[in-house]
Image (cartoon, grey):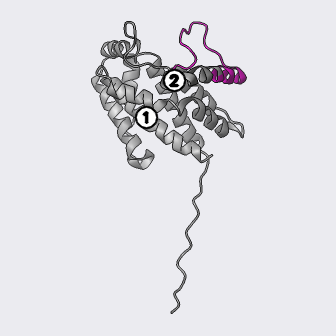
Amino acid sequence: MSTSPGPEAAPLQFHPPTAEEDRARAGYYALLARLFYGSPDAELLEAIANAEEMTADDAGSGLAHAWNSLATAARAMDAEAARIEYDEVFVGTGKSDVTPYATYYLSETGREKMLLRLKAELTEMGLARAPEAREPEDHFAGIFDVMRHLIAGSDDGALQKQKRFFVQFIGPSYSAFCDAISKSGKTNFYKRVGDFTRVFLDVESESLKVF
């Protein structure tokens, strides 16, 4: 008995992000860099609170839920409460409740190697800490800002540069960092920031694997 052949499966096709998608990615990295560098002021909280709601069709259900939850949290938060929370969680007296440095979440033997590689990478890019900055180069705020900078690159190797930097300096640490934020008994608004960070970087990780 013969059967007629069914339709051939269409091959999966991956394409580089569009300019609009890259602007969105760069914007999210810039926002995370700002939120982890210091507490949000009233203007930033208002901007997050009034941002357009994200739908699952736009970004997937996980990312949409995390973003919309962050916006809801921003509506309920005022700048002074955010400042107190940030200081208690990421600054503290003595040891902070959550350490915002990527190398902290690596094995002890890997910390110095990663920091040296990061410094060398930044030098190669022509980037350096601002003179007034006191934080080491592996502060997540700085690392996220480097990703924002790389996304703005327009040369043919831009995606490969982003992938290499992400794999080396963000991928090994971000999940444990977000776990620490989630488990902290002192996080309220920043619990939603941590949730969005994790989901966004999970999406980034999977997307960059393609290239």
Q: CA distance from mark 1 to mark 2?
A: 14 Å
Is 153 included in the stretch rendered in magenta? no
Measured as percent of width and height from the top left, residue 156 is found at 72, 40
Residue 156 falls left or right of residue 47: right
Instruction: Give amino acid for label 1.
Output: Arg
Q: Which residue corresponds to mark 1?
A: 198
Q: Amino acid at mark 2?
A: Ala
Which residue, given by chain and number where applicable, does mark 2 sit on?
102
Point 48% across, 25% down: residue = 105
Whether pointer 1 and pointer 2 mark residues with C-beta atoms closer than 8 Å, the reply is no
What residue sits 40% from the left and 19% below the top? 98
The answer to which of 113 and 80 lies nearer the viewer is: 113
Image quarter of residue 8: bottom right
Residue that sits furthest to the bottom in the current view: 1
**Residue 69 in view in this figure:** yes
Q: Residues within 10 Å of mark 1 (few under 14, many from 20)?
A: many
Q: Is residue 49 visible?
A: no
- Residue 84 sits above or below residue 2 on the image: above
Between label 1 and label 2, give the one nearer the viewer: 2
Instruction: Give the crowd class for mark 2: few <14, some 14-19, many >=20 residues within 10 Å.
Output: many
Specify the label residue 101 is tagged with: none
SS at badge 2: helix
Which residue is the extreme one toward the front?
A: 109
Residue 135 among magenta residues: yes
The region drawn magenta spans 117-140
Which secondary structure lies at badge 1? helix
Q: Residue at x 69, y 21 (%)?
A: 120
